């Protein structure tokens, strides 16, 4: 009818309006989140001077590019959903709904594979942690991740503190002051008088027996602590995963319903 062509939303119910603007608000929030992630990636690259002439050749392997890519894709996806819902653009909404459907399918596949290959994942995680320890002094990203894990989980090494012998600087055959030591994030109390960070608190720790070392550094490895942390917080993790998955299903449902209404009233 002529009225339908002049007023695209002619015949919409209150629920249709509510779902439309709910979809717009959800996508706006996720767009802001995407922009924040994007800004974090840019800040990470700039703060590490990754664009400097001597580092530009290795920028392709910089982990911050992953953060940058996730931020860009999340922003582009949610912005298309937001504009598509606001302008009732069928092309943008179809693109948005198809992408969300693919993401849901990928997450289900990843969850199934992760559950099936638990032992292989643990082995790959151990190998990755050992690589991070070996490159600890040479890669700022790996050093940051390793330090965060050790300090927050109060652990040292992969299986125990003597794993740090894999690093050429902490190996007992190394010529420097760090030989037979461990990073300060392994220390039980890395602060002197509660204020000054003592970067040498782990010097010589590998030479100590476990009874003596336990008062200076954390003895347990981080791999076991990671799995214990997951087991301890599995309820919270399950709730978060369920909510995130549910929100995606809800957004997909709302987008499909909005598309049906638009197709019906714009014919």
Image (tube, rainbow, N blue to C red):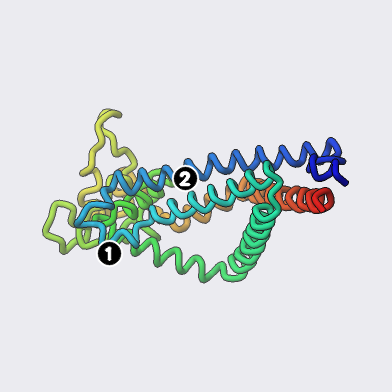
- Residue at the extreme front of the image, as rendered: 2
**Position of residue 151 in the picture relative to residue 28 (left or right):** left
User: Residue 111: x percent and y percent?
Assistant: 62, 63
- Marks 1/2: CA–CA distance: 34 Å
Mark 2 lies on a secondary structure that is helix
Looking at the rendered structure, which numbered label has been put on residue 37? 2
Q: Residues within 10 Å of mark 2 (few under 14, many from 20)?
A: many
User: Residue 10: x percent and y percent?
Assistant: 84, 40
Mark 1 lies on a secondary structure that is helix
Q: Nearer the viewer, mark 1 or mark 2?
A: 2
**Position of residue 189 in the picture relative to residue 86 (left or right):** left
Question: Disc 1 vs disc 2: Cβ atoms closer than 8 Å?
Answer: no
Looking at the rendered structure, which numbered label has been put on residue 166? 1
Residue at 47 percent across and 57 percent down: it is 224
User: Residue 214: x percent and y percent?
Assistant: 34, 47
Q: Residues within 10 Å of mark 1 (few under 14, many from 20)?
A: some
Mark before the other along the chain sequence, 1 or 2: 2
Q: Quadrant of residue 24?
A: top right
The foreground one among 83 and 207 is 83
User: Residue 113: x percent and y percent?
Assistant: 60, 69
Compared to residue 58, the image places residue 43 above or below, namely above
């Amino acid at each position: 009818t002529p009225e339908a062509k002049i007023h695209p939303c002619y015949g919409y119910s209150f629920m249709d309006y509510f779902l439309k603007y709910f979809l717009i608000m959800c996508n706006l929030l996720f767009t802001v989140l995407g922009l924040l992630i994007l800004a974090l990636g840019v800040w990470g690259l700039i703060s590490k001077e990754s664009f400097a002439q001597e580092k530009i050749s290795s920028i392709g392997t910089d982990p911050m590019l992953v953060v940058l890519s996730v931020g860009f894709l999340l922003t582009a996806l949610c912005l298309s959903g937001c504009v598509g819902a606001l302008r009732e653009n069928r092309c943008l909404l179809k693109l948005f709904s198809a992408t969300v459907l693919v993401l849901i399918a990928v997450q289900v596949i990843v969850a199934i594979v992760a559950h099936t290959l638990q032992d292989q994942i643990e082995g790959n995680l151990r190998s990755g942690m050992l690589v991070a320890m070996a490159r600890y002094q040479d890669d700022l990203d790996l050093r940051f991740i390793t330090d965060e894990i050790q300090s927050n989980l109060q652990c040292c090494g992969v299986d125990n503190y003597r794993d740090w012998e894999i690093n050429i600087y902490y190996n007992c055959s190394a010529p420097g002051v760090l030989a037979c030591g461990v990073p300060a994030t392994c220390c039980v109390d890395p602060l002197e008088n509660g204020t000054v960070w003592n970067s040498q608190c782990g010097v010589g720790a590998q030479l100590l027996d476990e009874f003596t070392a336990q008062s200076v550094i954390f003895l347990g490895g981080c791999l076991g602590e990671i799995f214990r942390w997951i087991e301890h917080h599995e309820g919270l993790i399950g709730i978060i995963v369920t909510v995130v998955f549910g929100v995606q299903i809800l957004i997909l449902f709302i987008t499909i319903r909005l598309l049906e209404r638009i197709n019906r009233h714009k014919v």
